[in-house]
Image: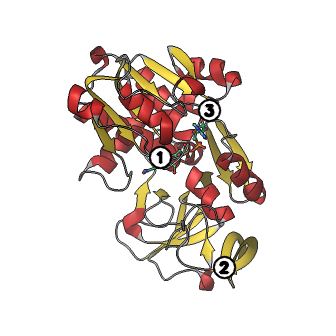
Amino acid sequence: MSDTFRAFVVNQVDGQYAGAFKQLSVSDLPDEKVLVDIAYSSLNYKDGLAVLGRGRGVVRNFPMVCGIDLAGTVAESKDPRFKTGDKVLALGGGLSETLWGGYSARQRINPDLLVKIPQGLTETQVMAIGTAGYTAMVSIMFLEDEGVTPDKGEIIVPGAAGGVGSVAVAILAKLGYRVVASTGRPEAHDYLKSLGAAEVLARADLDKQAKPLEPARWAGGVDSVGGRTLATVLAQTKPQGVITCCGLAGGNELPATVMPFILRGVKLLGVNYFEIPAGWRETAWKRLVSDLDRAKLDSMTEIEPLSDIQALAEKILRGKTRGRVVIDVNK
Ligand SMILES: NC(=O)c1ccc[n+]([C@@H]2O[C@H](COP(=O)([O-])OP(=O)(O)OC[C@H]3O[C@@H](n4cnc5c(N)ncnc54)[C@H](OP(=O)(O)O)[C@@H]3O)[C@@H](O)[C@H]2O)c1
């Protein structure tokens, strides 16, 4: 391996945010205990914000190597949990925010953030899952924890053609739920049916000014859109129904009323994939091995070169990427 390697780095100079490819050497990397040769990263909505400097402050230390996810091989380890040659992954935990991340051919990582790649999954597949897919799994675990079983009724997934949405549809369908997908893309209807959606709604059916209470339909929901969409979903949720909320692809406001909560006992559960009960990280990865159909995962994934990262970031922020995008950091 050559002494230097390529990384995508953002910097802020005189209030101007800019990203560029830099050649780094191992001595430039942070002083963490495990050096990883990275094969793949992924593209999440948050990566779009970090790469282009949009949103409010994803990146909090500069200069910053972007990329909230990474998968690769341990090159050196000063931590007893990992040895040279281990295949590992990391999802977030401060990567691309305060810690250097995965848009680099090599990185030194805090071992607390590393997980050995579960047997049955490849480096590409764990990045196809990435933070978005893992969050879909965690959201479903929250629904299950609240007693939302397939016999309770239909599950709504807004933003279904996106990363969180696509993985949620595929897992819920495999678990036997009747999944109703909502998308702003008419051309994605066949795709969503192929992932297991029983029915597909147009985005406009949910992204509207809803009444405080509407006819009750959903036993549960996995929302990554927020805004008016989430408010409508809440107004349409059945008594004792549970909706998880992890994202803001459609806006960070919640123009809802208290009526679904006080009259129907609806529950709204906030999801931060990193703030989960003890033991859930291991369980979530086991569940992703058993409950996410690999052929469906492959069908929702495209692999793109790191060299295109700025265009890809624009694309995900405009809601134009379908499913999940894996980033080949060596291309
Ligand atoms: N809290 C957490 O732990 C956590 C973890 C992961 C992700 N997230 C958040 O979850 C959200 C989704 O992330 P992602 O990586 O899945 O992004 P993504 O792949 O871009 O998916 C978002 C989807 O939302 C839909 N959408 C976009 N703009 C919309 C609008 N104006 N109105 C309604 N729907 C819209 C689109 O789906 P359609 O075209 O199908 O409508 C889009 O594909 C982001 O806000 C992200 O930050 C949070």
Among numbered discs 2 and 3, the one appearing first in the sequence? 2
Is label 1 in a helix, a strand or a loop? Answer: loop
Q: Which residue is mark 1?
A: 247
How far across and how far down the image is residue 325, in percent? 65, 44
Q: Which residue is mark 3?
A: 300
Q: Tell me if I can see residue 308 in this picture.
A: yes
**Quarter that holds the C terminus:** bottom right
- The residue type indicated by label 3 comes to Met
Q: Is the residue indicated by label 3 positioned so its CB lies within 8 Å of ligand 1?
A: no
Asked whether, in this view, residue 292 is left or right of residue 272, the answer is right
Q: Which residue is mark 2?
A: 12
- The residue type indicated by label 2 comes to Gln
Q: Is the residue indicated by label 1 positioned so its CB lies within 8 Å of ligand 1?
A: yes
* Distance between the alpha carbons at the discs numbered 1 and 3: 20 Å
Pointers 1 and 3 in contact (C-beta within 8 Å): no
Residue at the spot 70% in from the left edge and 44% down from the top edge:
303
